[in-house]
Amino acid sequence: MSKRYTKADLEEIVYKQLENLNAMHDLLGIMKFQNDLIHNINQTLREEIGQFKKQQVMYPTRRKPRSKT
């Protein structure tokens, strides 16, 4: 059995789909913004780690004497 849809039914379905598409568009915009924030934070973190590694002092360590065999 197939259901017969009226014009009003079809319009309601289309408007619901449009609302869903708009909501998805908003969510994608939010996700893009969050991605940009994460990218910027990661870039800053990479730079800070690089600066930290440059500032690190390497202390000399004692070498173990080689055993002669």
Image (cartoon, helix red, strand yellow):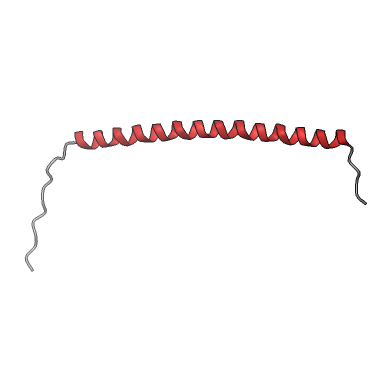
The residue nearer to you, when weighing 55 against 59, is 55
The residue nearer to you, when weighing 68 against 57, is 57
Question: On the rendered structure, is 31 left or right of 41?
Answer: right
Q: Residue at x 91, y 43 (%)?
A: 4
* Quadrant in the rendering for residue 28: top right
> Which residue sits furthest front?
7
Q: Position of residue 55 (x, y in %)?
A: 20, 33
Q: Residue at x 60, y 33 (%)?
A: 27
Question: On the rendered structure, is 19 left or right of 43?
Answer: right
* Quadrant in the rendering for residue 42: top left
Q: Position of residue 15 (x, y in %)?
A: 76, 32
* Quadrant in the rendering for residue 26: top right
> Which residue sits furthest right?
1
Q: Position of residue 35 (x, y in %)?
A: 48, 35
Question: On the rendered structure, is 65 left or right of 22?
Answer: left
Question: On the rendered structure, is 61 left or right of 44?
Answer: left
The residue nearer to you, when weighing 23 against 56, is 23
**Quadrant of the image containing the C terminus:** bottom left
> Which residue sits furthest bottom?
69
Q: Residue at x 45, y 31 (%)?
A: 37
Q: Position of residue 5 (x, y in %)?
A: 89, 41
Q: What is the total number of numbered labels drawn onto the structure image?
A: 0
